[in-house]
Amino acid sequence: MRSASDLTARARIRDAALARFGTDGIAGTSVRAVAADAGVSPALVVHHFGSKEGLRQACDDYVLDSIRSGGEASVEALDEILQAATPVRRYLARALLDDTPAAGALFAEIVERTEAWLATGEEEGWVRASADARARAVTYVSWLLAPLVLGDQVGRLLGGDPAETATAVRGARAGLEMLTHGLFADDRWLKAFTDINERTRP
């Protein structure tokens, strides 16, 4: 059985890795740098995680678990991203850019839960019906996660880091305002893309 101090050291190393990987990426991060950030020796990092790959996997698992802890409703899962510590959001953004297996699994899981959540909303009357429920769920999740991936560009225009909660919530609220009240006053663009979709469908 691990001692309390051992578990604390492991968590401290993982948190240092989350921050370092999120800033410098996996390739740009060394075990020595993570050890220095955590205030431990490189040997202790290897003792706990085996290698940098093992450390990366631990970070992936931690982020996945933190999102899954939101429960069945996808709105809660997505809220976990907004409320999570800034290093976790930065790590997630880097993972999505690097297209890690864990990031792919996370995206797919959130889409599945979102599709079910929206279907429940249709049944209960607080979500409008869709002609393509799958595409709706994928697009909805993509819109909410995009500011993390486009962090520098979004930050310059909104005047704040989208990995920080205040900017993340500001962007999410603007998106939800459009989704709730609508953006266009008529259906000209919907008709145009519906026609294109019907002509190009396999």
Image (cartoon, rainbow, N blue to C red):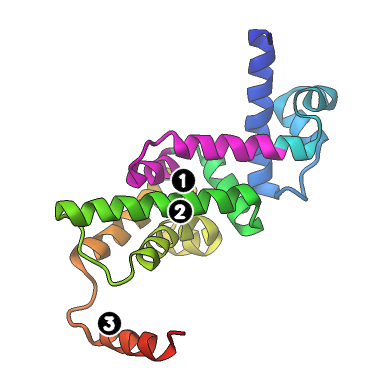
Name the front one of labels 3 and 1.
Answer: 3
Q: Residue under circle 1?
A: 164
Magenta stretch: helix, strand or loop mostly: helix
Q: Nearer the viewer, residue 12 or 154?
A: 12
Magenta segment includes 69: yes
Between discs 3 and 1, the one toward the N terminus: 1
Q: For the magenta stretch, what is the residue range?
A: 56-83
Tell me the tag on residue 190: 3
Could one spot residue 150 in this view of the protein?
A: yes
Magenta segment includes 110: no
Between discs 3 and 2, the one toward the N terminus: 2
> Measured along the vertical axis of the image, is residue 29 above or below residue 6?
below
Please rate how many residues cluster around mark 2, counting C-alpha atoms within 10 Å: few if below 14, some from 14 to 19, many from 20.
some
Please rate how many residues cluster around mark 1, counting C-alpha atoms within 10 Å: few if below 14, some from 14 to 19, many from 20.
some
Q: Residue under circle 2?
A: 160
Tell me the tag on residue 37: none
Helix, strand or loop at label 2? It is: loop
Say what amino acid the circle numbered 3 marks: Leu
Q: Considering the image in quadrants, where does the N terminus appear?
A: top right
Residue at 65% across, 24% down: 12
> Measured along the vertical axis of the image, is residue 146 above or below residue 17?
below
Helix, strand or loop at label 1? It is: loop
Left or right position of 195 against 80? left
Q: Nearer the viewer, residue 40 or 106?
A: 106
Residue 31, x across and y down, in percent: 80, 35
